[in-house]
Image: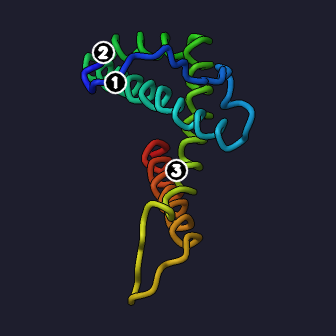
Amino acid sequence: MTPSGGRTTDLRLYRPRVSTWWWTRKRTYFVFVMRELSSIFIAWFVVYLLLFVYAVGQGEAAYQRFLDWAAAPWVVGLNVLALVFVLLHTVTWFSLTPQAMDVRLYGRKVPGFHIIAGQYTGLLVVSLFILWLVTQ
């Protein structure tokens, strides 16, 4: 007997087998999984930046060791791969923002295109400023 007073049965639920690679069959699922996977590479960039800042703080010898390590082919390859994933994350995040934000101006909803254009404009301005800082 079960606590509810009923009898136990040998009821077997139907559970269809789902492939491990189910997300590769539809483009939207694939992009979603890749965007989620990109968080690993964003974390790598944060760790890389922290290692860089630490090396700069330790002096010229540590900075040079960091540069030598960063020039290793596997680190360069990892950074290129991370850059691709970070760009994917940025593009997909920017395209989803109008769905997550309800921006109103003078009581009227701002079109999604304007929100996305504003994000890319801000990204361009900040990137150009950082480029200017680095090249000075």
Q: Residue 116 appears in which quarter of the rendering?
A: bottom right
Q: Is residue 76 above or below residue 111?
A: above
Q: Is residue 62 left or right of residue 94?
A: left
* Mark-to-mark CA distance, 2 and 1: 6 Å
Compute the Cα span from label 3 to label 2: 53 Å
The answer to whether 135 appears left or right of 78 in the picture is: left
Q: Would you name the residue on which mark 3 appears?
A: 93
Query: Horizontal and vertical percent for residue 127?
Result: 50, 51
Q: Is residue 54 left or right of residue 10?
A: left
Residue under circle 2?
1
- Looking at this rendering, what residue extends furthest in the right direction? 25
Q: Position of residue 11 (x, y in %)?
A: 51, 19
Between 6 and 123, the residue placed more toward the observer is: 6
Instruction: Please report whichever mark, 2 or 1, sits nearer to the chain's N-terminal start.
Output: 2
Q: Residue at x 58, y 33 (%)?
A: 33
Q: Amino acid at mark 3?
A: Trp
Badge 1 is on which residue?
A: 6
- Nearer to us in this view, 132 or 27: 27
Residue at the outermost bottom position: 106
Query: Upstream in the sequence, badge 1 or badge 3?
Result: 1
Which residue is located at x 60 percent, y 23 percent? 15
Given the image, on which type of amino acid does mark 1 rest? Gly
Where is residue 46? Give x, y as percent. 39, 29
Q: Is residue 124 above or below residue 68?
A: below
Q: Which of 50 and 91 lies nearest the eye of the viewer?
A: 91
Q: Are marks 1 and 3 in contact (CB under 8 Å)?
A: no
Q: CA distance from mark 1 to mark 3?
A: 51 Å
Q: Nearer the viewer, mark 3 or mark 2?
A: 2
Asked which secondary structure carries label 3, the reply is helix
Residue drawn at x 56%, y 38% is 35
Ranked by sequence position, the earlier of labels 3 and 2 is 2
